Amino acid sequence: MNVMKMAVGGIIGGLVGAAIWAAIGYFTGYEVGWIAWGVGALAGVGVRLVGTQRLANDTVAGAIAAIAAVASVLIGKYAVVLLFFVSPAESFSDYADEETMTAYLADEIAYDLESQGRAVDWPPGMD
C-alpha cells in the first residue's frame, strides 16, 4: 500500500468535487451544503482508486480519505465564498470609471436631498 499515492488520489478526487461545488455555487448563486457530502465521497473514491485492492489496512486508507475530504470541503467552501464576494466587485469595476461613479454618487445625493424636501443647488443649465 502506497500512502503517498492514496493521498494524491484523495486530493485529486476532493479537488474535483470542490471545483464542482464552486461551479454550482457560482452559476446558480446558491451554496448547496449537501454537495459537501459528494466532495467527501469523491475524495474517498480517489483514495480507493489508487490504493491497494487488499482490505487488510483500511484504517490508514480511511484516515487519508477523511483528511483529504475535510481539506477539500474547506477548499470548496473557500472557493464558493471567494466567487460570491470577489466576482461582483471585479465585474463592476470593468465598466465603472471615475466619471460614472461621480455621476452615480451625485444622483444619489440629489435624490436624498429632494426626498428630505431640501432644495438642490444645481449648476446653471443642469437639472
Image (cartoon, rainbow, N blue to C red):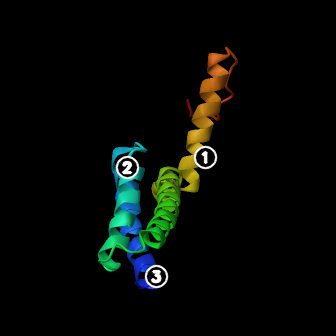
Q: Are marks 1 and 3 in contact (CB under 8 Å)?
A: no
Between the residue at mark 1 and the residue at mark 3, the CA separation in whole angstroms equals 59 Å
User: Which label belongs to residue 3?
Assistant: 3
View extreme (front): residue: 56
Q: Can you say which quadrant of the picture contains the N terminus?
A: bottom left
Q: Can you give x and y, in whole percent of width and height, for residue 118 in the image?
A: 70, 18
First-in-chain label (1 vs 3): 3
Residue 28 vs residue 68, the one in the foreground: 68
Left or right, 111 with reference to 70:
right
User: Which label belongs to residue 35?
Assistant: 2
Q: Report which residue position mark 1 lands on.
A: 102
View extreme (top): residue: 117
Q: As displayed, is residue 25 above or below residue 13?
A: above
User: Which label belongs to residue 74?
Assistant: none
Task: Tell me the amino acid under the disc marked 2.
Answer: Ile
Residue 102 vs residue 69, the one in the foreground: 69
Give the structural element (helix, strand or loop) at label 1. helix
Q: Residues within 10 Å of mark 3 (few under 14, many from 20)?
A: some
